[in-house]
Amino acid sequence: MDKCQANRSIKCTVEQCVNHCTNEQYCSLDCITVGTHEANPTVDQCTDCKSFQRKQ
């Protein structure tokens, strides 16, 4: 497995994501897409990281 290249501009604590740097709390992607599952989001729980990919 390749060493994870942490993007210091994207902090992340979701260890179940394939893009999460295991030994650090950062994402390895160059950028992420943030979206919502609500018609009228009003709190942070309404937002989602659309770049999430579950580890196999």
Image: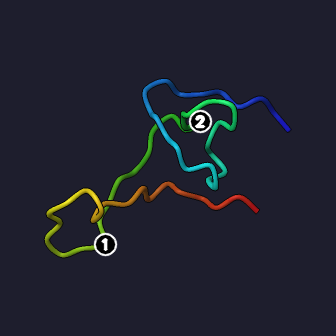
Taking the spot 18% from the left edge, 75% from the top edge, the residue there is: 39
Residue at the far bottom in the pictured view: 39
> At numbered mark 2, what does the secondary structure look like: helix, strand or loop?
loop
Query: Percent from the top left, x then y, of residue 54?
Result: 64, 61
Amino acid under disc 1: His
Q: Is residue 49 above or below residue 31?
A: below
Residue at the far right in the pictured view: 1
Q: Is residue 54 above or below residue 10?
A: below
> At numbered mark 1, what does the secondary structure look like: helix, strand or loop?
loop
Give residue 19's quadrant in the image: top right
Q: Label 2: few (<14), some or many (≥20) within 10 Å?
A: many
Q: Which residue is mark 2?
A: 28
The residue nearer to you, when weighing 33 against 55, is 55
Query: Percent from the top left, x then y, of residue 33?
Result: 39, 51
Q: Is residue 50 above or below residue 1?
A: below
Give residue 47's quadrant in the image: bottom left
**On the rendered image, what quadrant is the N terminus found in?**
top right
Query: Percent from the top left, x then y, of residue 13?
Result: 52, 44
Taking the spot 55% from the left edge, 34% from the top edge, the residue there is: 25
Q: Earlier in the sequence, mark 1 or mark 2?
A: 2
Query: Percent from the top left, x then y, of residue 42?
Result: 14, 63
Q: Which residue is mark 1?
A: 37
